[in-house]
Amino acid sequence: MKEIEDILKSENIKYNEPMSKHTSFKVGGPAEIFTYIDSISDLKKVLDLCKEKKLPITIVGNGSNLLVSDEGIKGVVIKYTANEIKIDRKNGKVVCSGGVINSVLAMQLKESELSGFEFAASIPGTIAGAIYMNAGAFGSEMKDIVNYVKYIDISTGEMITLHNNKLEFGYRKSIFEKINGVIVETEMQLHHDDKANIENKMIQYKEKRLESQPLEYPSAGSTFKRGEDFISAKLIDEAGLKGYTIGGAQVSTKHAGFIVNTGNATAKDILELIEYVKKVVYDKFNKKLEIEVKII
Ligand SMILES: Cc1cc2nc3c(=O)[nH]c(=O)nc-3n(C[C@H](O)[C@H](O)[C@H](O)COP(=O)(O)OP(=O)(O)OC[C@H]3O[C@@H](n4cnc5c(N)ncnc54)[C@H](O)[C@@H]3O)c2cc1C
């Protein structure tokens, strides 16, 4: 589309871009127009253009919690990649852009001897994705450290700031499920600790993941949310589903909560397997599994 080429550099626009390149599951058909946008001004211009042309918009982060259909995505996909990090060591605060990668931020916070973000160091996504999902691990979640979030409202182009108490953080969810917005910035509150302590925590967490998770295969992490009174992975395991395979999609033999792509899975394989697992668990235990992965 000619007009978008007047806003973004040509290397930041990809036509018919396979979403399998942008998701940790490594599945997903082509995005009609895939864009990397690294500034608020370009973001606003692209949003205006999409509005004018009535093009549907899909926002993605690092694609580590996404299952994109084999048919792909119509319209414009926006990956917001601004990655500025400003650390105020004295007050234990960090302000960063939505496109910052969690592991990159974690390393910088460690160097500044600021603690509180270690849990997210090996969650393979962006800060914006972590806020949207209220990502969490090892007893901590984004809601524990976020002070405020700034987002651009997609329909008005306005920048809006929401403080923690307005973000409706819950288990793997936030107000952004209900808002049509692009998360562009956040401030987080951390606390001082020794670099060695921070590093040790990060190493321990990483080792725990390596022990228990099938990181050698593409996946989107836990496929299902934890239930209110049950652990989804435990029920899937007890239902004898570890290793159950449809096409290239498999219930991990290492961690029943993960569906993995054994090499040539399609989104259809994964969706069928999700439905099968839900059905078996419901029939056996009368419990409804809810998926954590976002389906596009
Ligand atoms: C191996 C593995 C381990 C994992 N472990 C964990 C874990 O321990 N804990 C955990 O919580 N999750 C875990 N996950 C899931 C995933 O990493 C997190 O949900 C992560 O926070 C998603 O971030 P992302 O940038 O990849 O977002 P994406 O997957 O790209 O997107 C997730 C959602 O956020 C929205 N979004 C992304 N960016 C923006 C933006 N700028 N503005 C508005 N909306 C946006 C998308 O539209 C989508 O709805 C794991 C995944 C993998 C593959």
Image (spheres, rainbow, N blue to C red):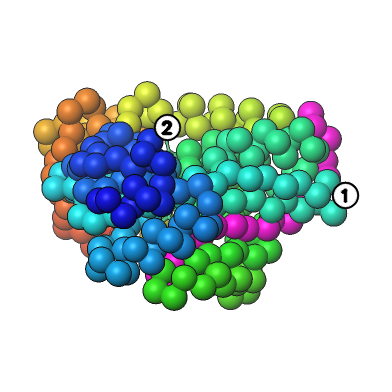
Mark 2 → mark 1, Cα distance in angstroms? 37 Å
Q: Could you say whether the residue bearing mark 1 is in a helix, strand or loop?
A: loop
User: In this picture, is 198 found above or below 273?
Assistant: above
Quick check: can you spot residue 158? yes
Residue occupied by mark 2: 213
For image coordinates 61% across by 35% down, the residue present is 104
Quick check: can you spot residue 273? no
Q: Is mark 2 within 8 Å of ligand 1?
A: yes
- Where on the picture, by quarter, is residue 142? bottom right
Name the outermost residue toward the right.
90
Under mark 1, the amino acid is Lys
State yes or no: discs 2 and 1 in contact (Cβ < 8 Å).
no
Q: Is residue 140 magenta?
A: no
Closer to the observer: label 2 or label 1? 1
Left or right: 13 as drawn, with respect to 54: right
Q: Is mark 1 within 8 Å of ligand 1?
A: no
Residue occupied by mark 1: 90
Residue 217 placement (x, y as % from top left) = 33, 27
